[in-house]
Amino acid sequence: MSKIIERALTHKAVLIAEIGVNYYDIAKKMNISNMEAAKLMIKKAKDAGIHAVKFQTYKADTLAAKDSPSYWDTTEETTTSQHELFQKFDQFGEKEYQELKDYSDEIGIEFLSTAFDIESADYLDKMMEVYKVSSSDMNNLPFVEYQAKKKKPMLISVGAANEDEIDRMIATVRKVNNQPLCILHCVLEYPTPYEHANLNKIASLKEKYKDLIIGYSDHTKPDACADVIKTAYNLGAVVIEKHFTLDKTLKGNDHYHAMDPEDARKILSGIEFIDTIRGKGDLCCLETEQTARKNARRSLVTTCDIAKGTVITREMLTFKRPGTGISPERMEEIIGRTLKVDVAEDTILKDEMLG
């Protein structure tokens, strides 16, 4: 089974490094091949503790028309044509992705890639345990259904989607696929300003789609304490996807809002701490509280000397620490009882003293 789905179904956080096509720029910077750069990024993700790596598989000619305008921050990525941008990063095909899949298996990290056309959806099938659908295709219902018919678990981002569109997408999947389905909150702004992250939508998705896994695909710039991701996790997103780079200062494409290995470690350690402080949620006294419970709670204590055979009245009792005697919650039950022994003032009452 997919490690992503296995962890998510047991409510364990999953971090997916969205390498996308960032390896092209890493290759250029380091003067190595695209394949060497892609493998290096997989290795760095694995070393950081990330659970899965995701690529993007497309050909510019099947993805965007020649005059498709940009939708990203052009001060960061200056290309203004989608087709022109995608054409820079569409050299890999089935052979290359199979090599990346094999390498990922070798070092022990899950591989997947978002398919953007029928051909790649077909050849990626044998390489992946789970399909990921981009927000840009979540309303492309024929393509969603085509991938759903592969009968594998699915991760589908719902950026820029209205509720009725999400409902139609889910219905489309469920017509042909009953495998685990994860929908990921996402904001289609690159980068997403913190004030636009709208993380409460995660809670809304969790409330409405109770039978689905909820996740978050993040496009904000990494913050100092990973508060964006940790908040998303606290609100119910167990599958976290974030763009990944080895150099956040690189211009262009998806480096400027990506996490690097150190950011990933910070995210994972933050989530681990959250899990530690969350606990189990059982409505009971912890074993570690037992001593404090006994000594910090109160018992019924006598306010005066009381002779054997005396009937206890309210005025003879008060309540003080520790809680090793009769609990004050039994006050009304104790009033009217008779003492079997002489009791001095400031004595903690015990049941064996009563007749």
Image: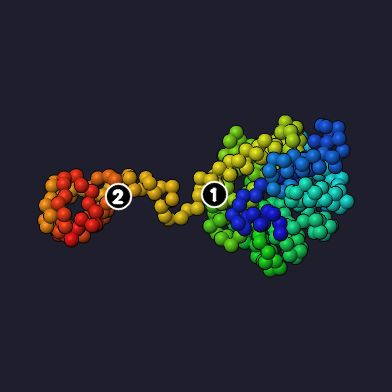
Residue at 54% x, 49% y is 235
User: Dot 2 lies on which element?
Assistant: loop
**Image position, residue 245 (x, y; %):** 73, 38
Residue 85 visible somewhere in the drawing: no
Q: Nearer the viewer, residue 191 or 269?
A: 269
- The residue carrying pointer 1 sits among few (fewer than 14), some (14 to 19) or many (20 or more) residues within 10 Å by Cα, namely some
**Three-letter amino acid code at the position of disc 1:** Leu
**Image position, residue 38 (x, y; %):** 81, 42
Q: Nearer the viewer, residue 225 or 337?
A: 337
Residue at 69% x, 54% y is 3
Asked whether, in this view, residue 153 is left or right of residue 319, the answer is right
**Image position, residue 315 (x, y; %):** 13, 50
- Separation of marks 1 and 2 at Cα, in angstroms: 41 Å
**Image position, residue 22 (x, y; %):** 77, 40
Which quarter of the rendering shows the N terminus?
bottom right
Residue at 85% x, 49% y is 99
Residue that protrudes farthest toward the bottom in the picture: 175
- The residue to which callout 1 is attached is 235
- The residue to which callout 2 is attached is 324
User: Dot 1 lies on which element?
Assistant: loop
**Three-letter amino acid code at the position of disc 2:** Thr
Q: How is the image coloured?
A: rainbow
